[in-house]
């Protein structure tokens, strides 16, 4: 989040230019440039008593100093106090340091003690020449985020000068009502800032380092509160706009439901009821429909499309990839063409690779309203696409689209004077804390559970050295009439990552299985080529499909019961879960084999352990958020959302709950305080979500 208060002439021009690289534009930004960590320089350890693998401070006399050249050039000093000796190594050093760190010099060192070949040693410690009775620091020393040409010490001096001048009194007034602070036991805002920059001598180092000290809690609470206020205001703003009222009529929807070979689950019925109610409201729906892989989101979205069409309004369905968009087109055409043909309604398909004549026909049908449903990729929001009466925009895998793309699609309905309803779908379940923070401006529907008759997917972890066993399993499954996927991460060979390419794997597997029909699909094929391969696989003509991760979402082949994911250690949790969801779509038991290459990093081990132990997408998403943080997890959505700097959604769930409650209370009872708080944290509010 970008804070915006205070005077911009708080440092010299050169320093200000460097500070701007850290996002610091004024004194308030400087006050909010909080320490990364704290160093304890308040006491000294005798050298022989200094614990290993812990940052400690020692002091002694240099008794030996030498530049050594083996195994590499380094400055090595030996330091002694009354208890013992320790080696100090500087791998990068200046000539001035060689002169300064001469024999007989007293130095104070801060660093991590570790065992060396000749005894205890420190590598690149913080080193300061001191006098014999140099006083120790009386409090923890803050260490700040830095940039080129601006050290932590320089930033510390600048902040201390600002605090000592009293200017912080102007820029850090208390905004929140006293009764709220007392109820939630929050310290004063200014006192919290002052304390974090200049901790008291008796401050708990562990509470400060772990950011659980009350001063840290106050800063994190205020940041979360600003985010909640911005989301709630956006939510209110959206509900104040007018939208097309699309009441439930049930004629087409009932006909569709009767024609389907399955019944809706309880979760689907609940989600459909929530969406249907929103469509009948006078303000634009902005609802996120989320459910695990294979939970049946598409049919619920189709019912929403029909409710719009029953009211004589158009609908658009946008997907992030050609494969997924074309699959939606084929599936919805199969469901809806029998309903639409007697009414003279068509479905338009738009992609970036259509022939000019076909595209012109589709654009004309959308513009004159004869195509009541348009399906496509990002081509849908391009300037030349004009809708007659767009009433509903459905966006699949919404996290892959940015704010501006979603806004462009929404603006397609602007010429009628009302905003179209928006339904966003996600097969990547969103953890509760993320939903409450970055998605707090949306209404959320969750489809819990899977359709009946789905067999669970068994996940196996197999080292690459056991590849022959895996190919044996493939042969067995295909000879039994089943189909299989073999997924490779990259299409081009990378020496650094040592990944097999899909092309190479396809050639190898053709030699291994000369009796099988093996297909290949990857990102470089044209949309027509991809569709032809996928259709052959779906029809059972291809027994084994070698693919890159282009089949990550949406592909539905019930007879495919075995998947091999190569180099699974290189993939993220969400991607592995999405890929695994391509099998287990029929009644047969399915297996997903995760092939990995040793040695595994600690992070890769943890990822594979999580995907092995869990099948619930929401639980996997919670772990994914913990490992990656919200920035990567959110994808393109983050371009419209103020990102959190201090709060951690995994650890600060309690603060988030409190911030939600206080945001409602401020907007209701203390609107001026809400306005001031937002101005402090978000400036003029230009970062509010717009879609």
Image (cartoon, rainbow, N blue to C red):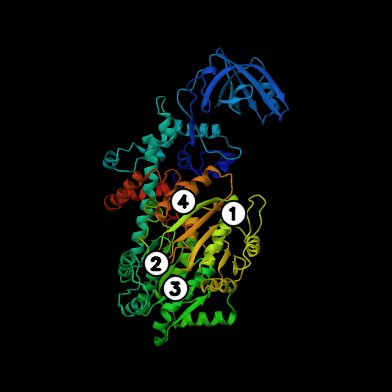
Q: Secondary structure at mark 3?
A: strand
**Label 4 packing within 10 angstroms: few (<14), some (14-19), many (20+):** some
Q: Nearer the viewer, mark 1 or mark 2?
A: 1
**Badge 2 or badge 4: first in the primary sequence:** 2
**Badge 3 or badge 1: first in the primary sequence:** 3
Q: CA distance from mark 3 to mark 4?
A: 38 Å
Residue located farthest toward the top when viewing the structure as drawn: 82
Q: Name the residue: 58% across, 44% down.
A: 599
Q: Secondary structure at mark 1?
A: helix
Residue 43 seen by the camera: yes
Nearest the eye: 338 or 138: 338
Q: Secondary structure at mark 4?
A: helix
Disc marking residue 541: none
Q: Nearer the viewer, mark 3 or mark 4?
A: 4
Which residue is identified by label 4?
A: 612
**Badge 3 or badge 4: first in the primary sequence:** 3
Q: Secondary structure at mark 2?
A: loop
Which residue is identified by label 1?
A: 467
The part of the image, by quadrant, that contains residue 425 is bottom left
- Residue 345 place in picture, x, y as percent: 42, 83
- Residue 115 place in picture, x, y as percent: 58, 25
Q: CA distance from mark 4 to mark 1?
A: 19 Å
Which residue is identified by label 2?
A: 296
Q: Name the residue: 68% across, 20% down.
A: 65
- Residue 307 place in picture, x, y as percent: 35, 75
Q: CA distance from mark 2 to mark 4?
A: 24 Å
Disc marking residue 316: 3
């Amino acid at each position: 989040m970008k804070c915006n208060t205070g005077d911009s002439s708080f440092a010299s021009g050169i320093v200000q230019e460097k500070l701007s690289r850290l996002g610091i534009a004024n004194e308030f930004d400087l006050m909010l440039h909080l320490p990364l960590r704290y160093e304890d320089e308040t006491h000294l350890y005798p050298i022989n008593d200094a614990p290993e693998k812990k940052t400690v401070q020692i002091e002694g006399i240099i008794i030996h100093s030498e530049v050594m050249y083996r195994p590499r050039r380094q400055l090595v000093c030996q330091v002694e106090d009354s208890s013992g000796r320790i080696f100090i190594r500087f791998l990068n050093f200046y000539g001035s340091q060689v002169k300064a760190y001469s024999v007989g010099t007293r130095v104070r060192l801060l660093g991590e003690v570790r065992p060396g070949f000749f005894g205890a040693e420190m590598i690149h410690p913080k080193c300061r020449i001191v006098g014999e009775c140099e006083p120790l620091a009386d409090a923890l020393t803050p260490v700040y985020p830095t940039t080129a040409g601006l050290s932590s010490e320089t930033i510390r001096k600048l902040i201390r000068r600002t605090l000592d001048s009293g200017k912080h009194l102007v820029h850090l007034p208390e905004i929140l009502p006293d009764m709220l602070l007392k109820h939630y036991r929050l310290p004063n805002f200014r006192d919290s800032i002052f304390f974090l920059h200049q901790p008291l001598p008796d401050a708990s180092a562990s509470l400060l380092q772990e950011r659980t000290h009350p001063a840290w809690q106050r800063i994190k609470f205020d940041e979360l509160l600003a985010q909640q206020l911005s989301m709630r205001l956006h939510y209110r703003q959206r509900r104040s706009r007018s939208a097309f009222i699309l009441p439930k009529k049930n004629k087409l929807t009932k006909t569709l439901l009767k024609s389907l070979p399955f019944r809706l689950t309880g979760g689907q019925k609940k989600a459909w009821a929530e969406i249907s109610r929103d469509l009948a409201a006078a303000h634009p729906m902005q609802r996120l429909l989320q459910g695990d892989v294979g939970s049946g989101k598409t049919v619920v979205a189709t019912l929403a499309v029909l409710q719009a069409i029953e009211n004589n309004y158009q609908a658009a369905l946008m997907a992030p990839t050609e494969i997924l968009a074309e699959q939606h087109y084929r599936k919805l055409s199969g469901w809806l063409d029998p309903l639409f043909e007697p009414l003279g309604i068509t479905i338009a398909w738009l992609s970036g690779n259509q022939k000019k004549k076909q595209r012109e026909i589709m654009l004309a049908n959308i513009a004159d309203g004869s195509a009541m449903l348009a399906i496509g990729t990002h081509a849908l929001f391009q300037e030349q696409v004009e809708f007659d009466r767009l009433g509903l925009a459905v966006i699949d895998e919404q996290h892959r689209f940015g704010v501006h793309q979603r806004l462009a699609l929404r603006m397609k309905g602007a010429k009628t004077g009302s905003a179209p309803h928006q339904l966003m779908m996600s097969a990547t379940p969103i953890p509760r804390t993320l939903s409450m923070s970055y998605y707090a401006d949306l209404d959320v529907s969750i489809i819990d559970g899977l359709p009946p008759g789905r067999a669970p997917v068994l996940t196996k972890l197999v080292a690459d050295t056991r590849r022959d066993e895996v190919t044996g399993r493939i042969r067995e499954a295909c000879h039994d009439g089943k189909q299989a996927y073999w997924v490779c991460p990259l299409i081009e060979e990378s020496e650094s990552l040592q990944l097999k390419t899909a092309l190479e794997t396809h050639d190898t597997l053709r030699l291994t299985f000369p009796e099988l029909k093996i297909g290949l699909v990857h990102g470089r094929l044209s949309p027509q080529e991809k569709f032809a391969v996928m259709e052959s696989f779906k029809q059972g003509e291809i027994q084994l499909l070698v693919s890159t991760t282009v089949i990550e979402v949406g592909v539905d082949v019930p007879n495919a019961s075995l998947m091999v994911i190569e180099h699974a250690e290189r993939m993220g949790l969400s991607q592995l879960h999405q890929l695994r969801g391509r099998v287990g779509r029929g009644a047969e038991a399915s297996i997903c084999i995760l092939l990995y290459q040793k040695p595994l990093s600690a992070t890769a081990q943890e990822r594979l352990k999580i995907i092995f132990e869990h099948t619930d997408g929401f639980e996997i998403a919670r772990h994914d958020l913990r490992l990656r943080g919200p920035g990567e997890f959110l994808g393109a959505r983050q371009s419209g959302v103020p990102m959190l700097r201090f709060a951690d959604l995994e650890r600060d769930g309690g603060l988030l709950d409190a911030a939600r409650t206080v945001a409602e209370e401020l907007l209701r009872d203390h609107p001026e305080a809400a306005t001031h708080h937002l101005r402090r944290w978000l400036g003029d509010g230009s970062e509010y979500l717009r879609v």
